């Protein structure tokens, strides 16, 4: 059994390697051709004069852009750098490594070409206008690491005004992954989702979306006590009521939950809770072992802050939590949006859906939970891991089938067609990377072995 010191040292290693390897590779993504180039004569096909033919075809029928360009498989990852991981407002330049990493995951896990775009503005209206004028170049938009409450306003405006899907991964992706993990963790401890008490720690973009999905999943809202940086949420939170137009989602939580009017902070929210769902400030120490000890028996603790969870998982287990999950891939039970966004976008693009609905997210969450259950659940494996890439086509198919059911898909495909198409695209992306490594174009750094 590793000591606390050994566990802590292991937790620091990813950050240490990241600094060396980001400098070695100068980032994580690049642009490469997808068509053959045998000699310069091919440029007459791919560029002038040949390229004029597809240009004129698209002018005559704009929908042909999806057949004659890469738009059908291309998305933009847009951020203003105001809420990067748990680091806060670090600016667009400092946020770029995260957006590049996101693009890497989209390609390798979902076969999707994603372009990182970090904007030099914090103004929500300017962000909305900028994203709207990008629409002709992309099949979808992934909003990332934008602070609240403007992230809600930006997402709502763009979903109303754009004809391509817009998704805020910090909200919708985090909520989808969390719900899947909760479904399976409850099965492990034999508790019903409609009869549990939940403490929600942090009411930013992620937990607001979690709350919305919990409402649609049969959770008793009367059993929820939420907590933000100023304390528990209840009907007497005048600071939120006075700004309810600005913090509409948070005021809704004040009105719908905590009927006992529990006041205080995290300690009071956790008392007697069956489940803790934390998306708050990076720890450790945000949640203490003493507070975990006051939770109900067989407690479930989701400490999802990144890059450091609100409490180290070994501390939570020692304090009595039965199942502990974090957002990190180097600990058991990773509950991270990376488990869902490649598949959800893959399915959305493959049927050319106009938007990504909560129902599509719920379908993805239940499919993700099923994948884990089929492979066998245990206390340190409530969800599949990122390397189990075969899960992604299933999430893609579930998402796409729900889009068709709701009548928001432009293309109609069978589940088998969706699975085959997703598997092919993902295999192509992985094979391309493997080929570059074998050819020595991408060198392997010794310290990664």
Image (tube, rainbow, N blue to C red):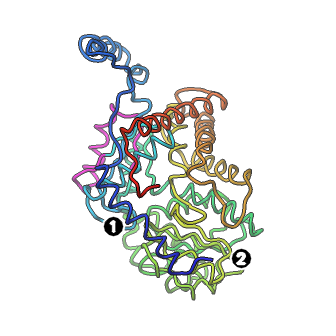
Up/down of 415 relative to 62, above or below: below
Q: Nearer the viewer, residue 26 or 419?
A: 26
Judge left or right: residue 238 versus residue 133: right
Q: Which residues are magenta?
A: 117-143
For marks 1 and 2, give the CA distance.
Answer: 33 Å
Up/down of 282 relative to 334, above or below: below
> Element under label 1?
loop
Q: Look at 56% across and 34% down and name the residue there.
A: 422
Q: Position of residue 291 (x, y in %)?
A: 57, 86
- Mark 1 touching mark 2, by CB under 8 A? no
Is residue 222 something that shows in the picture?
A: no
Q: Residues within 10 Å of mark 2 (few under 14, many from 20)?
A: some
Is residue 136 something that shows in the picture?
A: yes
| Furthest residue toward front | 446
Q: Is residue 133 magenta?
A: yes
The residue at which mark 2 appears reads as 298
Q: Quadrant of residue 417?
A: top right
Up/down of 114 relative to 211, above or below: above
Q: Position of residue 336 (x, y in %)?
A: 52, 58
Q: Position of residue 223 (x, y in %)?
A: 64, 74
Q: Look at 60% across and 48% down and name the residue there.
A: 388
Q: Residues within 10 Å of mark 1 (few under 14, many from 20)?
A: some
The residue at which mark 1 appears reads as 88
Judge left or right: residue 123 versus residue 214: left
Q: Is residue 404 magenta?
A: no
Q: Look at 64% across and 82% down and name the residue there.
A: 295
Earlier in the chain: of badge 1 and badge 2, it is 1
> Element under label 2?
loop
Q: Look at 75% across and 70% down and name the residue there.
A: 189
């Amino acid at each position: 059994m590793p000591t606390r010191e050994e566990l802590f040292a292991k937790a620091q290693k990813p950050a240490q390697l990241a600094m060396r390897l980001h400098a070695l590779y100068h980032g994580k993504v690049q642009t490469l051709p997808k068509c053959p180039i045998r000699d310069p004569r091919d440029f007459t096909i791919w560029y002038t004069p040949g390229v004029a033919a597809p240009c004129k075809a698209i002018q005559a029928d704009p929908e042909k852009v999806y057949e004659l360009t890469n738009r059908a498989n291309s998305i933009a990852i847009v951020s203003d750098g105001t809420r990067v991981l748990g680091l806060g407002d670090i600016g667009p330049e400092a946020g770029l490594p995260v957006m590049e990493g996101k693009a890497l995951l989209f390609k390798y896990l979902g076969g999707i070409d994603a372009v990182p775009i970090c904007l030099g503005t914090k103004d929500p209206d300017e962000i909305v206008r900028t994203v709207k004028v990008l629409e002709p170049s992309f099949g979808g938009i992934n909003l990332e690491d934008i602070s609240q409450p403007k992230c809600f306003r930006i997402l709502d405006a763009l979903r109303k005004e754009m004809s391509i899907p817009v998704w805020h991964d910090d909200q919708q992706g985090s909520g989808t992954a969390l719900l899947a993990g909760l479904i399976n963790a409850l099965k492990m401890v034999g508790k019903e989702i409609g009869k549990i008490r939940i403490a929600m720690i942090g009411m930013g973009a992620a937990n607001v979306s979690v709350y919305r999905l919990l409402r649609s999943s049969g959770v008793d809202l009367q059993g929820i006590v939420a907590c933000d940086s100023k304390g528990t949420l209840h009907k007497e939170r005048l600071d939120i009521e006075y700004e309810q137009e600005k913090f509409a989602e948070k005021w809704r939580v004040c009105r719908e939950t905590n009927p006992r009017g529990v006041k205080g902070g995290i300690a009071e929210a956790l008392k007697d809770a069956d489940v803790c769902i934390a998306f708050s400030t990076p720890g450790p120490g945000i949640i203490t072992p003493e507070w975990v000890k006051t939770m109900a028996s067989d407690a479930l603790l989701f400490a999802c802050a990144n890059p450091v969870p609100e409490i180290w998982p070994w501390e939570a287990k020692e304090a009595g939590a039965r199942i502990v999950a974090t957002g990190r891939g180097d600990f058991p039970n990773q509950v991270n949006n990376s488990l869902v966004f490649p598949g959800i976008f893959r399915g959305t693009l493959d049927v050319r859906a106009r938007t990504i609905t909560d129902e599509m997210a719920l379908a993805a969450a239940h499919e993700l939970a099923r994948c884990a259950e089929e492979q066998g659940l245990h206390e340190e494996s409530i969800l599949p891991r990122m390397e189990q890439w075969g899960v992604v086509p299933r999430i893609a198919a579930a998402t796409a089938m729900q889009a068709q059911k709701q009548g928001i898909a432009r293309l109609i495909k069978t589940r088998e067609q969706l699975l085959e198409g997703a598997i092919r695209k993902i295999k192509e992306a992985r094979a391309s990377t493997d080929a570059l490594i074998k050819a020595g174009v991408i060198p392997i750094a010794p310290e990664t072995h």
